[in-house]
Amino acid sequence: MTNMASRAPHHGAGSSRRPIVAVTMGDPAGIGPEIVVKALAAPELYAVCRPVVVGDIETIARTARAVRAPAAPKPVAAPREARFAHGTIDVLDLANVDLASLRMGAVQADAGRAAGQAVERAIRLAQAGEVDAIATAPINKEALWAAGYPYPGHTEMLQELTRSCESLTMFVIDRLRIFFLTRHVSLRDAIAQVTRARVRDTLGIMAQVLAELGLASPRLAVAALNPHAGEGGKMGDEETRQIGPGVEDGRAAGLDVSGPIPADSVFHLAAEGRFDAVLALYHDQGHIAAKMTDFYKTVSVTTGLPFVRTSVDHGTAFDIAGKGVASAVSMSEAIRVAAELASRRAANAARAGLGLL
C-alpha cells in the first residue's frame, strides 16, 4: 500500500497557498546547477509554486553569473525564511562544494557527496512538513558510489531513507502517464520478472496512486512484451501465460484495465486519451515511448513515498557541463509537475477528510 497521502502537506497544496518545492542542485560537476538556475529564472514557475534550492550557494552564484541569469541567490536557513519571489533564488546553503578543486564534467567523490547530501536534506525537509515536494536535478551514479553511497540512484536512496517498500516510477508527459513493471535490470532479468502476480499487484498500486492524485477510476492499459502481443503464442507465450492472466486478475479486483496491447500502439492510444496510464514492462519500452513523445518534457515521478518527488529524465551531461548550453525545459517541467501533483494530492486528501470521496 502506497503511503503517498500519509501526511497532509504543511504548506498549502490544499489551500490557497502555492506548494513549496525543494529543488536539489544535483551533481555540481554536471549540468544540474545550470538547469536549476535557468529554470528559476522564469517567472512562470513562481506562479504555481514556491521553490527553494537545496545545495551549495557558491556553486549556484557562480552558475548564475556564468549564464547571466536575472536572479540573485540568497541564503536561507530554512524554507520558512525564503522570499519565494522571482528575481531571487532562495538557497538552503549546505556549503559543501570547493569550487577551487571542482572539475567540471568529471566523476569525483566530493561532487557525489555534495549531491547526496542535498537529497538527504531535501528528504528531511519533506518528512518534517517544511516542503510539499522535491524536484531533483541529475546525479551521477559513479560519483555517488565514490562518495560512499550504496544506492544505484535517486529512487533507491529515497526508498531507503523513507523506508518506503512499494515504490513505482511514473513518467508524465502532458496527458501520457507511463508506469514501469521493471527498470534497472537487464532485459533477460526483466522478462523473467514479468509474472502474473507482479502484473496484478502493480496494476493495483497504479490504480491507488492515480486515485490519490484525483483519478478515482483510472483507465489502465498493459503493454505486450512480444511483437503483436505474441500472436496467440506463435511469437512468445508470456502474454498468454503471465500478462493476460495478470490483467484478468486486475479486472476481477474491479480495475478498468485493458491488455496486453502491442507496445507499438498502446502508448500512442494513451497519448490520444484512450487510457489514463500504461504499464510498460521494462526500462527501454517505456523510456523510448516517453522520449519520442517529448524528450525534454518527460518528467519522472517516484510514487509510494510520503511526499511528491519528481525528477528530470536525463543525466548529468558531463560532456556539456559548464558550457552554458544545457536546456532547462525538463527541470522546469519537473518543478511544475511537482507543484501540480502536490496540489492535487493535498486537495484529494482534504476531500477525503471531509468525507467527499
Image (cartoon, rainbow, N blue to C red):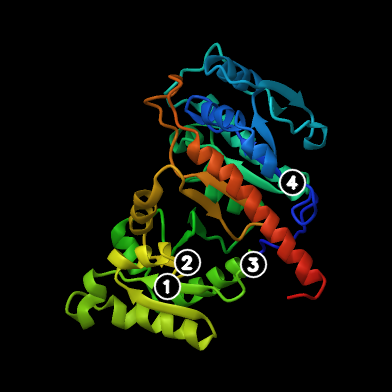
Amino acid type at circle 1 is Ala
Return the residue at label 3: 214
Q: Secondary structure at mark 1?
A: strand
Taking 23 as reference, is 273 above or below it?
A: below
Give the number of the mark in front: 2 or 4: 4
Amino acid type at circle 2 is Ala
Return the residue at label 2: 277
Q: Earlier in the sequence, mark 1 or mark 2?
A: 1
Q: Would residue 331 appear left or right of 9 to someone viewing this image? A: left
Q: CA distance from mark 2 to mark 3?
A: 13 Å
Q: Would residue 46 appear left or right of 186 to someone viewing this image? A: right
In the image, residue 331 lies at what x, y percent?
53, 38
Q: Earlier in the sequence, mark 3 or mark 1?
A: 3
Q: CA distance from mark 2 to mark 4?
A: 27 Å
Residue plotted at (74% across, 31% down): 85
Q: Secondary structure at mark 3?
A: loop
Q: CA distance from mark 1 to mark 2?
A: 6 Å
Q: Earlier in the sequence, mark 2 or mark 4?
A: 4
Q: Which image quadrant is residue 131 in? A: top right
Q: Secondary structure at mark 2?
A: strand
The 10 Å Cα crowd at callout 2, few under 14, some 14 to 19, many 20 or more, is: many
Taking 306 as reference, is 207 above or below it?
A: below
Tell me whether the residue at label 1 lies in contact with that at label 2, contact meaning CB atoms closer than 8 angstroms.
Answer: yes
Return the residue at label 1: 221
Q: Secondary structure at mark 4?
A: loop
Return the residue at label 4: 18
Give the number of the mark in front: 4 or 1: 4
